[in-house]
Image: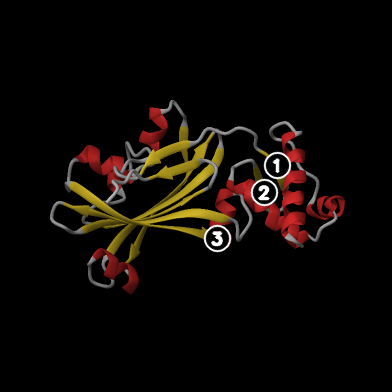
């Protein structure tokens, strides 16, 4: 399909999406591809841009739905803050779902990142973040057991490991180094976020440092585009 034809397809899809109220279900892929006169592969490619904007959501095995206007969490990356803190600032309610706290042993790759011996005890905390009852982010934190235990999280844990450590005040946190990438969703992450495998996500891979220069937390964050906007303020020169 040529560029002009693809742009025309996106325009037609935009018109269709704009004409439907929120929560409406779009026609099935075969029916919509037939209506638009394109292949299903071309249709999926065109639909990705609307998913990225947070205008539609595909639910595995169910169908594609119009989302409509959604609240967006927008933030700079100069200061590390939790999703909960950012949401409170704009009066947005977020909740934690599918919380899982596991005791595991450090394999080589994780041991290298955290600077600990292979086989050391770790705590892995994974959970979904919901906005208006929709999954919008999936977070996974991995920490040495000497920093955090299952018992520590038995009461008063609201979903943010960062906020928990800041409230506790120990160890003292000073910085974070984050790699940011656009990735495609694995089968497991797609299932949790109720999207299709291969859909595009924003991924943060971060190491949280203590005042002693030690990595105390390695976190993986998967954000649905359209619900989050990140920016950086930089000086010229």
Q: Residue at x 18, y 41 (%)?
A: 169
Q: Residue at x 31, y 46 (%)?
A: 234
- Residue annotated with mark 2: 58
The answer to which of marks 3 and 2 sits earlier in the sequence is: 2
- Residue annotated with mark 1: 65
What label does residue 56 carry, if any? Answer: none
- Residue annotated with mark 3: 184
Whether residue 169 is situated above or below residue 6 in the rendered picture:
above
Q: Residue at x 20, y 47 (%)?
A: 173
The answer to which of marks 1 and 3 sits earlier in the sequence is: 1
Estimate the x, y position of residue 235 in percent, counting from the top left.
28, 46
| Mark 2: secondary structure | strand
Q: Is residue 76 left or right of residue 216?
A: right
- Contact flag, marks 2 and 1 (Cβ < 8 Å): yes
Whether residue 165 is situated above or below residue 145 in the rendered picture:
above
Q: Residue at x 77, y 40 (%)?
A: 16
Estimate the x, y position of residue 208 in percent, counting from the top left.
26, 53
Q: Is residue 73 left or right of residue 15?
A: left
């Amino acid at each position: 399909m040529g560029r002009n034809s693809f742009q025309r397809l996106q325009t037609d899809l935009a018109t269709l999406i704009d004409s439907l109220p929120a929560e409406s279900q779009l026609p099935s892929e075969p029916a919509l591809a037939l209506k638009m006169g394109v292949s299903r592969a071309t249709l999926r490619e065109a639909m990705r841009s609307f998913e990225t904007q947070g205008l539609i959501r595909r639910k595995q095995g169910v169908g594609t739905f119009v989302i409509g206007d959604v609240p967006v969490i927008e933030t700079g990356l100069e200061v590390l803050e939790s999703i909960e803190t950012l949401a409170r600032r704009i009066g947005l309610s977020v909740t934690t779902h599918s919380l899982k706290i596991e005791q595991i042993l450090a394999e080589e790759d994780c041991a290298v990142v955290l600077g600990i011996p292979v086989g050391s005890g770790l705590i892995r905390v994974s959970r979904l973040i919901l906005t208006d009852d929709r999954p919008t982010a999936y977070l996974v934190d991995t920490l040495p057991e000497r920093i955090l235990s299952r018992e520590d999280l038995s009461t008063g844990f609201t979903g943010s490991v960062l906020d928990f450590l800041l409230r506790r005040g120990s160890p003292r946190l000073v910085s974070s180094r984050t790699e940011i990438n656009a990735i495609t969703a694995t089968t497991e992450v797609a299932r949790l976020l109720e999207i299709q495998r291969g859909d595009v996500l924003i991924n943060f891979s971060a190491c949280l440092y203590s005042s002693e220069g030690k990595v105390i937390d390695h976190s993986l964050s998967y954000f649905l585009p359209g619900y989050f906007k990140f920016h950086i303020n930089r000086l010229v020169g």
